[in-house]
Image (cartoon, helix red, strand yellow):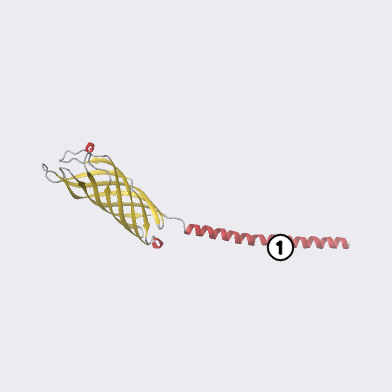
Amino acid sequence: MKKIISFLLFLILFNINAFTQTDSIPADGVVVQDTVIENISKKKSHKRVSDFKIYGGVSTSKILLSNSSYESAYAAGYLLGFSYKRGRFAYWEIGVNYNNSVVSLEDVNVLEENMQIRQLEAPLSFGINLLSLTRRVLGVRVFGGVVPGYIVGIDDNPFNLGEDDFNRFQLSGRVGAGVDVFFLFLEVGYQYGFIDLLKDQDSDLSQLDLRLGFRF
């Protein structure tokens, strides 16, 4: 009888000890789980942010000519586009523009006249958010980059200049600054052509632009 009672006490003590150990596991598991969740939250808080942007704007352009029978002056045009921006303090941005540049040309035989140059562009820029901590409410940015482009059309003009007179592929540099306020942004930029617009003569495009758009 004593042996049976001793055996039962052993089983009871064994089960109590096992239950105590099993019961302590979830507590440790909760601590580990909380730590994992906290680490994930920290990573998300430092994760890079991104914006999709659509915009329209106005521009003023001229052709910088040398050793040419033409003279050029600034004239007003417009542009439309969209882009994708990624980054918090330092960022990169890539997009697509429809750039309707208008330049004023004059030669000895023709009165001064505006000419439209239509390009599709794929700007790529890198910049810095000077107010990165408040960028969703208020941001100030500076940027610079390159703008590959392709001339898709030249309007009829009294200078008898057509698409065959232009280098269709273009490459420009662009620098500028922007201000973000909630879902709106405003940018001002300057673009300078590295490839001559007109074949066989120095003719770089100089363009100032002002863009207003939405980001989401």
Q: Which residue is farthest right?
A: 1
Element type at marker 1? helix
Quadrant including the N terminus: bottom right
Instruction: Please determine whether, in this image, residue 203 is positioned above or below residue 85.
Output: above
The residue positioned 78% from the left and 63% from the top of the image is 13
Amino acid type assigned to the residue bearing label 1 in the image: Thr
Left or right for 89, reference 104: right
30 with respect to 75 (left or right): right
Q: Where is residue 119 in the image (x, y as percent from the top left)?
A: 27, 43
Q: Where is residue 9 in the image (x, y as percent from the top left)?
A: 81, 63
Number of callouts in the render? 1
What residue is shown at x 38% (from left), y 52% (from top)?
Answer: 92
Extreme residue toward the left, this view: 109
The residue to which callout 1 is attached is 20
Horizontally, is 83 left or right of 27 in the view? left
Image height of 68 relative to 187, above or below:
above
As drawn, the residue found furthest toward the top would be: 164
Give the quadrant of residue 12: bottom right
Residue 149, image x and y in percent? 30, 43
Outermost residue, front direction? 67
For the C terminus, the quadrant is bottom left
Q: Nearer the viewer, residue 195 or 21?
A: 195
Using the image, determine if residue 210 lies above or below residue 112. below
Camera-nearest residue between 107 and 13: 107
Question: x, y (%) of residue 184?
Answer: 33, 58
Callout 1 crowding tier (Cα within 10 Å): few <14, some 14–19, many ≥20 = few
